[in-house]
Image: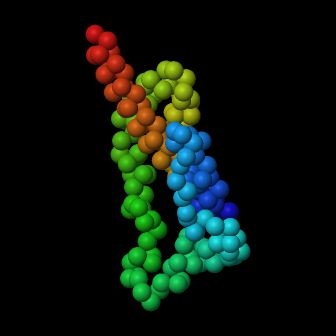
């Protein structure tokens, strides 16, 4: 099953609006209404065959087909809505030295939160990196930089 569909189905199953483990104090919180998460709509979507969702092997086949007459060809042919193609790949490839120095010698590896061997493998020069690893690497970088900044602020405050 294509990763995009797995991700979207997973988002439906874990809709945070419905399963808030930390309700507002007093035990009362607003009832959120999301018609697209209703059981009949979800069941209808799940009955649509995969080959319709992935028309000609491309994600969002149903939408692409439905809006062919209304949407410019460039939009129908694009692969990503939120970024250009291969942005994560280029970002990681162009910054491998920086990523290695920050992540391999970082707080998260030192504290055993990140696996050094896995990070070395993910940041190697081999072209076998899975596209799914790249957002995780960038997320780990953001956390590492935040921890370093927070640690420096805490040390300054203590001094």
Whether residue 126 is visible, yes or no, is no
Q: Quadrant of the C terminus?
A: top left
Query: Quarter of the image holding residue 6?
Result: bottom right
From this viewpoint, which residue is outermost toward the bottom?
A: 69
Q: Quadrant of the N terminus?
A: bottom right
Point out residue 88 in the picture as x, y percentages from the top left corner: 42, 51
Vertically, is 10 above or below 73? above
Query: Quarter of the image holding residue 27?
Result: top right
Using residue 76 as the reference point, say whether residue 61 is left or right of it: right
Choose between 149 and 140: the one closer to the eye.
Answer: 149
Residue occupying the point 36% across, 41% down = 95
Residue occupying the point 64% across, 72% down = 41
Point out residue 134 in the picture as x, y percentages from the top left corner: 48, 47
Point out residue 112 in the picture as x, y percentages from the top left corner: 55, 23
Residue occupying the point 40% across, 38% down = 142
Choose between 11 and 59: the one closer to the eye.
Answer: 11
Vertically, is 27 above or below 34? above
Residue occupying the point 50% across, 25% down = 109
């Amino acid at each position: 099953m294509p990763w995009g569909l797995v991700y979207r189905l997973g988002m439906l199953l874990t809709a945070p609006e419905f399963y808030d483990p930390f309700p507002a104090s007093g035990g009362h919180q607003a009832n959120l209404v999301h018609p697209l998460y209703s059981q009949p709509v979800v069941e209808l979507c799940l009955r649509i065959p995969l080959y319709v969702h992935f028309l000609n092997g491309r994600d969002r086949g149903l939408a692409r087909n439905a809006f062919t007459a209304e949407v410019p060809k460039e939009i129908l042919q694009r692969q990503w809505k939120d970024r250009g193609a291969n942005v994560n790949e280029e970002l990681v490839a162009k910054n491998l030295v920086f990523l290695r120095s920050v992540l391999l010698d970082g707080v998260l590896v030192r504290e055993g939160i990140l696996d050094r061997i896995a990070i070395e493998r993910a940041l190697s020069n081999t072209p076998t990196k899975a596209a799914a690893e790249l957002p995780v690497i960038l997320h780990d970088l953001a956390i590492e930089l935040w921890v370093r900044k927070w640690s420096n602020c805490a040390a300054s405050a203590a001094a």
